Amino acid sequence: MPLRFGTIEQTAFFKASPEQVYAALLDPKKHSEFTGSPATTSARKGASFTAWDGYITGKNLELVKGKKIVQEWKTTEWPDGYPVSRLEITLAAKKGGTELKMVHSSVPAEQVAEYTGGWKSAYWSPLKKYVAKRKEASPKEGAGGKKRGLTRVGSRSRESASP
């Protein structure tokens, strides 16, 4: 039986700079703060990392500060025989914040639906709250104490089979 893969594509908007979003994703202290779980993330190319107390493991393949993160990625639930997936996050400054585009490819097809929801609930929503709190704590970055963070999330998934 051939291996079956899917791709998850999501877009999120954060009321924070690309550098702040990049740092939250790669700095282990900030990552742990916004997810609420231990992480050994790193902003070094070639570095291995863990997130969610070892549930996620991977390796940084390409890093462009404040712009791009490319990683090998898998979880402890990865099916036997499947290669690691590829996670690519691009960050772009947009009026009022940062647009994050994520393409998570070569995901085992049976896990696409679960991970599609997981990215939203375990990453984008908590990151929204994290940047909102940081904005409120820093008046020069976010006047008026208004809640800031994720304002929209889009998602698309597709499935394919290996040859």
Image: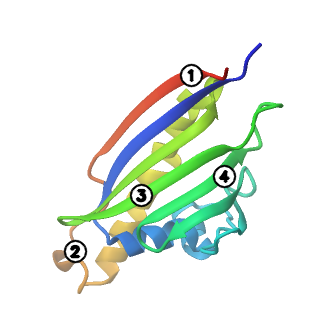
Label 2, secondary structure: give it: helix
**Residue 89 visible in the current orientation:** yes
Q: Tell which circle, 3 or 4, labels the residue nearer the N-terminal end.
A: 4
Nearer the camera: disc 3 or disc 2: 3
Which residue is identified by label 1?
A: 160
| Real-space CA distance between mark 3 and mark 4, rounded to the nearest whole angstrom | 15 Å
Q: Tell which circle, 2 or 1, labels the residue nearer the N-terminal end.
A: 2
Which residue is identified by label 2?
A: 145
Say if 52 sits above or below 79 in the image.
below
Specify whether 143 is left or right of 38: left
User: What residue is shown at x 34% (from left), y 50% (from top)?
Assistant: 12
Which residue is identified by label 3?
A: 90
| Real-space CA distance between mark 1 and mark 4, rounded to the nearest whole angstrom | 19 Å
Q: Tell which circle, 1 or 3, labels the residue nearer the N-terminal end.
A: 3
Q: Which residue is nearer to you in this view: 98 or 119? A: 98
Q: Tell which circle, 3 or 2, labels the residue nearer the N-terminal end.
A: 3
Q: Amino acid at mark 3?
A: Thr
Label 1, secondary structure: give it: strand
Say if 145 sits above or below 49 in the image.
below
Percent from the top left, x then y, of residue 148? Answer: 27, 64
Q: Tell which circle, 4 or 2, labels the residue nearer the N-terminal end.
A: 4
Nearer the camera: disc 4 or disc 2: 4
Q: Amino acid at mark 1?
A: Ser
Indicate the quadrant where residue 36 lies: bottom right
| Real-space CA distance between mark 1 and mark 3, rounded to the nearest whole angstrom | 23 Å
User: What residue is shown at x 23% (from left), y 77% (from top)?
Assistant: 142
